[in-house]
Amino acid sequence: MTPKQIIEAWMGVKELTGLVLPYSKARALAALKKKLQSEVDVIAEHEKSLAESMGGKPDGPNDYIFPDQDIKKKFLLEVRRMHEENDETLTLPPLDLSEHTAQLRISAAAIEALENIVQFEHDSEEAKG
């Protein structure tokens, strides 16, 4: 997964955390959220270190002030490049919510972000389209 996909999946899981599920499913969702949160924290720390190495100063959450616009552009390009790097070693615990979809209120963006992590339908339902 790329950092961009991790961040999107983390945001998708946040949409699901208000859902009341049977214990085993809630526990699995909590484990997934915790794993994604730790990955997002690592990504944020990398960005912070990069910004500081380029003379950036924090300016609110996830934003930095740089000495000039050229340095900021260079930082943003580097962050974009970082967000596209694939980490094939990352494994996330799978989560099957296919029996609970009637309870779900989730955005299409979250479904897309969680496509290969959370199973929302039984395989036979996916085949129907």
Image: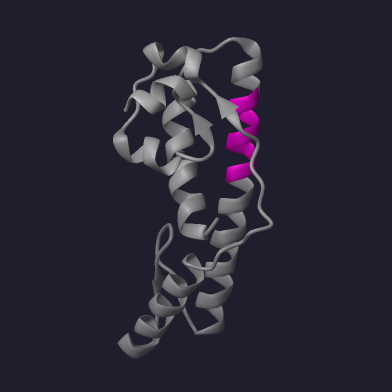
Quadrant in the picture for the N terminus: bottom right
Colour treatment of the image: one colour
Q: In which quarter of the image is residue 46?
A: bottom right
How many numbered badges does the structure rendering display?
Answer: 0
Quadrant in the picture for the C terminus: top left
* Residue at (59% x, 63% y) in the render: 45
Residue 89 at x, y = what percent?
A: 69, 57
Looking at the picture, does residue 92 appear above or below residue 48?
Answer: above
Residue 111 at x, y = what percent?
A: 38, 35
42 and 25: which one is in front? Answer: 25
User: Is 58 colored magenta in this rendering?
Assistant: no
* Residue at (47% x, 53% y) in the render: 5
Residue 115 at x, y = what percent?
A: 45, 39
Res 35 seen here: yes
* Residue at (38% x, 12% y) in the render: 102
Looking at the picture, does residue 88 appear above or below residue 55?
Answer: above
74 and 80: which one is in front? Answer: 80
28 and 62: which one is in front? Answer: 28
Main SS, magenta residues:
helix
Res 18 seen here: no
Boundaries of the magenta span: 28-36
Residue 18 at x, y = what percent?
A: 46, 21
* Residue at (51% x, 32% y) in the render: 118
Looking at the picture, does residue 1 appear above or below residue 47?
Answer: above
Q: In the image, is 31 to the left or to the right of 43?
A: right
User: Is 34 colored magenta in this rendering?
Assistant: yes
